[in-house]
């Protein structure tokens, strides 16, 4: 069983039975349990490898909504309402959305692997602000429906849960906001905004870029920059993209790639040292980001730039 990764604890444990986690899973059954809590959203990864029946149960609360995305190709669970149960099959990318306001009990048959996102009530107003639409009260509850967009976002978030100390919280915040925005439109009934968003003022844009460049390896959060600009996190994200055409994470990676080009062209530093100098996590991260942005590896680019 792998260790839980929980940089911030947020779950209410007052009424939780012993040996049961914040999502109603029996800890003794879990082979993987990871948690990453951000100011707006909480992310979890729960996995069981054994071919057995386990149970999930939570009492009604005001925690908001929980979205689960299946990371495995096959999964079955029986969800009970009173004495009546319904069987549901999940493929890879199959999702469920449940309201914490309802009692929940489910028997899980065999192995499962889910990435889960907890959306508190406060998130809906922030996400609506980001979308530029009126706030909605909640989400439609679905079970077993395939959603390729959420599947893609879940796989993008998975490395951050596995290695939170190495993850860019800037990236996590942006993926979280993208996920929440999509949920609001797809399952909350919010329409896309009709009006063009306002960008940042010149002063706020300069301050935001300065903060992004000063923080090493993305160790700055969207809420932190937004507070400095005296605006909400959701409004800041919208305004930054309107002003620059990029998300903060995309803009920051572009700056690092440009700096790396200068090192590759003008110095003889090994690639590993260029990666460190440009604040990439390691040479592998540097090569991956550089290749995606430029279309070739750093080594090839260096050779071609010198003829």
Image (spheres, rainbow, N blue to C red):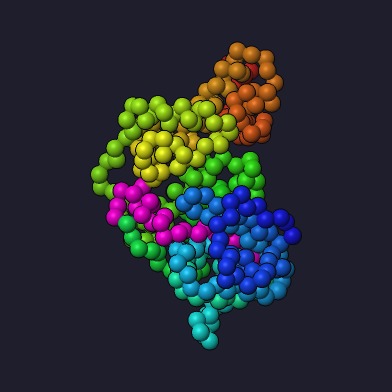
The answer to which quarter of the image holds residue 264 is top right
203 over 144 or under it: above or below = above
The answer to whether residue 126 is magenta is yes
Span colored in magenta = 111-134
300 over 73 or under it: above or below = above
Where is residue 22 shown, x and y percent of the image?
A: 58, 64
Q: Quadrant of the N terminus?
A: bottom right
**Side (left or right) of 199 relative to 60:** left
**Side (left or right) of 242 relative to 59:** left
Where is residue 183 shown, x and y percent of the image?
A: 42, 57
Residue at screen point 48% across, 73% down: 60
Q: Nearer the viewer, residue 203 or 145?
A: 203
Q: Quadrant of the C terminus?
A: top right
| Residue found at the far front of this picture | 14
| Residue found at the far bottom of this picture | 83
Residue at screen point 44% across, 36% down: 225
Q: Nearer the viewer, residue 256 or 110?
A: 256
Does the rendering let one see residue 92?
no
240 over 190 or under it: above or below = above
Tally of marks: 0
| Residue found at the far left of this picture | 195
The answer to which quarter of the image holds residue 223 is top left
Residue at screen point 64% across, 43% down: 165
Residue at screen point 55% across, 72% down: 58
Does the rendering let one see residue 224?
yes
Q: Nearer the viewer, residue 96 or 220?
A: 220
Where is residue 301 shown, x and y percent of the image?
A: 60, 22
152 over 277 or under it: above or below = below
The answer to which quarter of the image holds residue 114 is bottom right
The answer to whether residue 60 is magenta is no
Where is residue 15 shown, x and y percent of the image?
A: 57, 71
């Amino acid at each position: 069983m792998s260790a839980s990764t929980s940089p911030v604890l947020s779950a209410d444990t007052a009424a939780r039975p012993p040996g049961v986690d914040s999502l109603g899973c029996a800890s003794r059954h879990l082979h993987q349990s990871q948690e990453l809590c951000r100011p707006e959203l909480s992310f979890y990864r729960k996995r069981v490898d054994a071919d057995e029946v386990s149970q999930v149960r939570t009492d009604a609360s005001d925690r908001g909504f929980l979205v689960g995305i299946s990371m495995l190709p096959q999964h079955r669970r029986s969800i009970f309402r009173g004495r009546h149960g319904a069987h549901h099959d999940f493929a890879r990318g199959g999702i469920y959305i449940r309201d914490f306001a309802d009692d929940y009990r489910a028997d899980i048959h065999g192995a499962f692997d889910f990435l889960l996102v907890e959306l508190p009530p406060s998130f809906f107003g922030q996400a609506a602000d980001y979308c530029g639409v009126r706030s909605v009260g909640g989400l439609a509850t679905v079970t077993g429906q395939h959603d390729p967009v959420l599947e893609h976002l879940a796989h993008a978030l998975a490395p951050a849960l596995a290695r939170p100390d190495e993850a860019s919280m800037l990236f996590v915040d942006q993926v979280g906001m993208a996920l929440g925005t999509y949920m609001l439109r797809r399952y909350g009934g919010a329409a896309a905004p009709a009006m063009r968003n306002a960008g940042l003022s010149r002063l706020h844009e300069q301050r935001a870029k300065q903060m992004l460049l000063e923080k090493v390896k993305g160790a700055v959060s969207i809420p932190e920059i937004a507070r400095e600009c005296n605006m909400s996190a959701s409004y800041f994200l919208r305004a930054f993209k309107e002003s620059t055409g990029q998300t903060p994470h995309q803009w920051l990676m572009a700056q690092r790639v440009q700096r790396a080009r200068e090192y590759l062209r003008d110095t003889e530093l090994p690639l590993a040292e260029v990666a460190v100098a440009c604040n990439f996590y390691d040479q592998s991260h540097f090569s991956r980001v550089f290749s995606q942005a430029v279309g070739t590896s750093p080594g090839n680019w260096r050779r071609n730039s010198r003829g």
